[in-house]
Image (cartoon, helix red, strand yellow):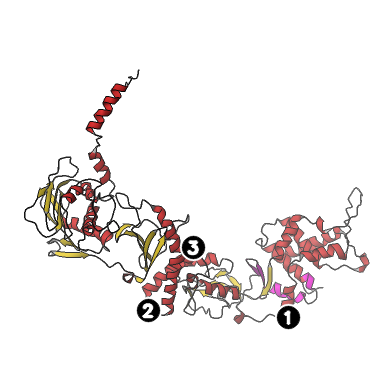
Amino acid sequence: MKKEKITRKKLTEELNKISQDGISTDTMHLKKDMCAQFSDPDEWIREYVVNAYDAKANLCEIWGEENSKETTIFVKDNGHGMDRQGMHDFFTIYRSRKKGGPRRAIGMFGIGKMSIAAIPCQTKFFVQTSTGAECWEVETGSLLEEKPIRLNKVSQVPEHGTLFAITFKKKEKLINVLKKLHGILRKYTRYLPLDTYVCFPEDKENKKEEYKERIGEEWSADTELFGHSTNFISEGNEFEIILGIGPASHEIYQNRVFISDQYNLLTHDLTNSFNLPNLRIRVDSLDLELPFGRHCLSNEDVLIPLVRHLRKNVFPDYFELLIKNWQAGRLRDSGPKISRIEEMVVELIMFWPHLEASWGNFPVFNIFDHKKVSLAGLEKMVTETGNIYLAETENTGVDYSFFDGPVLTIDQPAYSLNFLKKYFQKELVNLSLNDVVIEAPSTSCPPLTEQDLKFEEGLGIDLEVVKENLDSNFGWDRNTSSESGSIGKSKIDFDDIPREIKDASNDFRKLTWKVNYLVGKDGKTPCKTHRFIVNNDTVILNLYHPDVKKLVKLSLKAPKLAAHWAVAMCLTEDNRILSHLSSERREDLLLLDVMTRVEFREGTGGKKSYDELNRLKRSMWKLLKDHEFDFSKN
């Protein structure tokens, strides 16, 4: 298709026509798009109460009338009213002459009046306004219509104030409409310094007469449980902050009008966010920018310094105040108060388990003897005793007083048991498990003898001893004779030991070896079923078990042999010890253990064949595997 050639003359004519007629817009679509910004059509009531406040009213009343087809809601205030220019501006989009200065007015664009058009099936609109010197009124249909709006002057001028009457097709009873509007005002304007009343009609079904309900609360830290207020200025933006204890909420306001609770004011800037229970935060700022619907912020970036200041400074200081209230005894007389703070503490230490923080020192966990301890207190107890116990679910008749570590009760603040199990994973013994075997508390077992302690000292593998034996004490003839008759001799150096065995030996040296009396989960009943138990990096041989008793007895005559058999017994029976080792490597590791313990006689010239050592290892291995202990022989 051939394009039409535009001449200079034709272009000039078109531009002149546009200049004369002006550029027109589709105002109907513009109005509909603006109304769509209000998530709830009933939120129009918020805009009209806010307008009353902007007009310096101190009283605003809302009531209604209904017939079979229509419902009309009236909003009346005693503000300064509007003159002729004010009425003209009211019906002009983006025109709003707010009296009282921009810092007092709520919103920027003067489009709140258009929220009426968002009401489905809005059919009539009436307004009468008086400045005390002049009075004007308008009556029209739907605000989405394109009909001209006629402004009429009222000759008899009433006192200053404004009355709105908004009519829409009836969908439900008037009392239900007023209850919805009341709920919206409670949410958005309860802190607005304006006496607002919703007047409810007679309710014959529930036998209620006409009555009024006032909407309004004082904006003060005194209205919160353990309330605390502070101010914060960042990059010229001012914020007023109020904290308290109660149902968790993070609310943002502008000039005491609720804007949003969708922002987490403690972790908004963090990737891993969490919700802290029972903390109430209110923030008010005139430096917030709002979109048409006023349900969020246009300038969310201003929250970043606020959130960081709250998390790093305001909240820790506030929690210090809670600690002082607790120390002064103001929290102990109220179960609900203390339980809310305990839930908060548990959540805090799950995400910020800093013992130096104030919440790390708040007593929240229940232990036997009817005491509560903090996370820092538990950490100190476990460091001193090495153990922490979790009581049985059914613990009737169990005496935990002689246990050598703190015993946690099953009754703990919500979610805290899982946290404690994870936090004290290495030290915690769960007494609810059926097969629990534990070290006997010091108050319920015989004392360790001198021989028990000497036997304990000989356990384990010392790689440095192996190296010393190989390098200094003797040279090994590695007799590699075979069926072919070839013979070769070489000195085995420490470096000839495979790297994996060296690493395993280094890991093995990190184990702690102990002897003690093992008991059942009641802390008293001697255990005779377990030769030993493994508790993380500690191997504990059971002095109640007959085989271990024989090893201790053997150690009087052959301490190195007894220690070697004890080590080999543990390695063969429990694969959790150095679980990364194969069976072959475990045998090699035991060979190293033999090297640390076997004594060499002068008759061999300080030399012993490698094959002989392997034969010794295999015979000892078989003996240990078969558990053919006969300690009565040398």
Helix or strand or loop: what does disc 1 sit on? helix
Q: What label does residue 333 carry, if any? A: 2
CA gap between label 2 and label 3 equals 29 Å
Compare residues 406 and 399 and report the one nearer the observer. 406
Compare residues 231 and 262 and report the one nearer the observer. 231
CA gap between label 2 and label 1 equals 53 Å
Report the span colored magenta.
Answer: 532-561
Q: Amino acid at mark 1?
A: Glu
Horizontal and vertical percent position of residue 275: 42, 60
Question: 53 left or right of 578?
Answer: left
Asked if residue 557 lies in the magenta stretch, the reply is yes
Horizontal and vertical percent position of residue 101: 27, 57
Q: What label does residue 351 carry, if any? A: 3
Quadrant of the rendered structure where residue 493 is? bottom right
Q: Which residue is mark 1?
A: 450
At x 23% / y 45%, what residue is drawn? 93
